[in-house]
Image: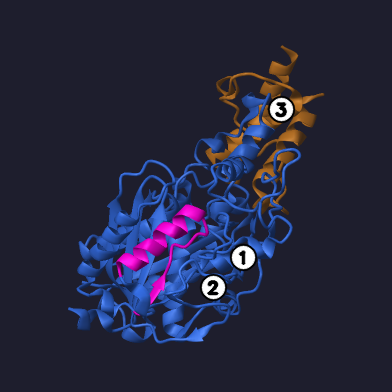
Amino acid sequence: MDSNQIAEIIIAEIRETVPELAGQPITAQDSMAELGVDSIERSEVILAAMEKLGLKIPMVQLHGARNIGGLAELLLAKSAG
Amino acid sequence: MAAVVTGIGVACGLGHGKAAFRAGLFEAPDLFSELKREGREPAEGEASFLGVEMPELPEVLPTRLARSATLSGRVALTVLKEAWLEADLDAVDPERIGLVVGGSNLMSREQALAARDYAGRLSYLPPRHGHMFLDTDICGLCTSSYPIRGFSMTIGGASASGSVAVIQAMEAIRSGRVDVCIAMGALQDLSAYDLHAMRSLGAMGSARFADKPGKACRPMDADRDGFIYGEACAAVVLCRQGLTSKHKIYGELLGAGHVADGSRGPEPSSAGQVRAAKMALSDAGLGLADIDYVNGHATGTPAGDDAECETYRTLDLQHARINATKSILGHGLSAAGAIEVAAVLLQIREGRLHPTRNLENPLDPSFDWVGGEAVGHEIRHALKFSFGFGGIDTALVIGAPGTGARAR
């Protein structure tokens, strides 16, 4: 699993959580907040991605990512650790 | 000052909206069957629960909102939309509109399903579960979708919750707190846990007519063996008299009584019921002789119907026509009072009374029951009872349009 694959998992969860984004391209460079995903939805997306990766860590350890790619890198680092 | 009703929204086994409700109320088709919704399966080896489940909801909500709202929340928004548009509330100052949602522990079926689904994986519980199962999530869904900015709240009265919400809304109008107040009886979305407990308590029936679901719900009949659940939700829009023109009015809420009778659990109290009725009549400035129609609480429990008949006898209601809306819709619990107030108002407008299903051997034949067929009747003043576990007794006096001014 590399960070691109993790980004794809995150994007799939965003599409599931905010069906209204259907048709709009989403890439690793986008930030969820700028896409209009609200804070509760962002938590849902991250938790769902964590479960797909089998990762159990406090959510606070994932703060600070600037975009979907950054979040994927953080998740990859935690998965490896 | 009387509060007048200018809008109604309903959802129940008859369908979504007033057109289906009005048609079905007078035809009284058999809606009862085994409950099929996920989370209402009986214990292993036991008979299915019986009742009424409403048809699939019309898709009126944005997908993003619909996926994050419970069934109780989504139904609330559909009935609010219907009532809102009919009462033309876009024309009212949002800060002068209030919302009272009747009911508590409303979403227990979906909460039980979530507890099942996240057992062993609590770490991944969606944060939204911290607010979406609160009864007040219905307030949040309604006020974020419609410009209601006076106040919003939920209020509990068990099976009387819908009526307690109407009473609270009346008080908000009378006190001048708001000009418009929406009273809602929210959908009580029962889980198997709730259903099983109420059946073992002896309150909910279904044993005697397990293989004939259409016969199981029989309020005020000698062969009743408990209430039968029926999904429902209703909203009525109460307005300060004079705020709107008379032709749009369904009826007037003339008086209310709401007392505590001192019971802890499900046991009824005729003394409390009588006290609530007298309080409502006194509030309306009317006497018992003025009442020409009674909409009973009439759930079909053995003890409850006996106590309610005793109440009718104590009040000498032999001159009034009486029917039981739950015989058609089942018992909506938190929603019952509100959807039955809606039924009273539609009967006022139609000049007819709906049938009482399965009333083959009335408990007390001295009363003027409406039996298996609808009958013509011009209601002037209706008395509507609702009672709840925990010793809660309410009565409402509802008048035809224009009766309020004359009563005073």
**Is label 3 or label 1 in front?**
1
What distance separates the C-alpha of mark 3 from that of mark 1?
A: 39 Å
Q: Secondary structure at mark 2?
A: loop
Residue occupied by mark 1: B13
The kind of residue on which mark 2 rests is Thr
Given the image, what chain letter belongs to the residue carrying mark 2?
B
Residue occupied by mark 3: A51
Could you tell me if residue B281 is visible in this image? yes
What distance separates the C-alpha of mark 1 from that of mark 2?
A: 16 Å
Q: Which of the chains is blue?
A: B
Q: Is residue B308 above or below residue B8?
A: above
Q: Which residues are magenta?
A: B292-315
Residue B372 in the image, given as x and y percentages of width and height = 58, 78
Q: Residue at coordinates 53% horizontally, 49% vertically from top-left?
A: B203
Q: Is residue B295 magenta?
A: yes
Q: Is residue B38 magenta?
A: no
The kind of residue on which mark 3 rests is Glu
Residue B375 in the image, given as x and y percentages of width and height = 50, 85
The residue at the far right in this view is: A1
- Residue in front for this viewpoint, A36 or B253: B253
* Residue B221, image quadrant: bottom right
Residue B49 in the image, given as x and y percentages of width and height = 67, 50
Answer left or right for B389 relative to B63: left
Q: Residue at coordinates 61% horizontally, 38% vertically from top-left?
A: B112
Q: Residue at coordinates 23% horizontally, 63% vertically from top-left?
A: B279
Given the image, what chain letter belongs to the residue carrying mark 1?
B
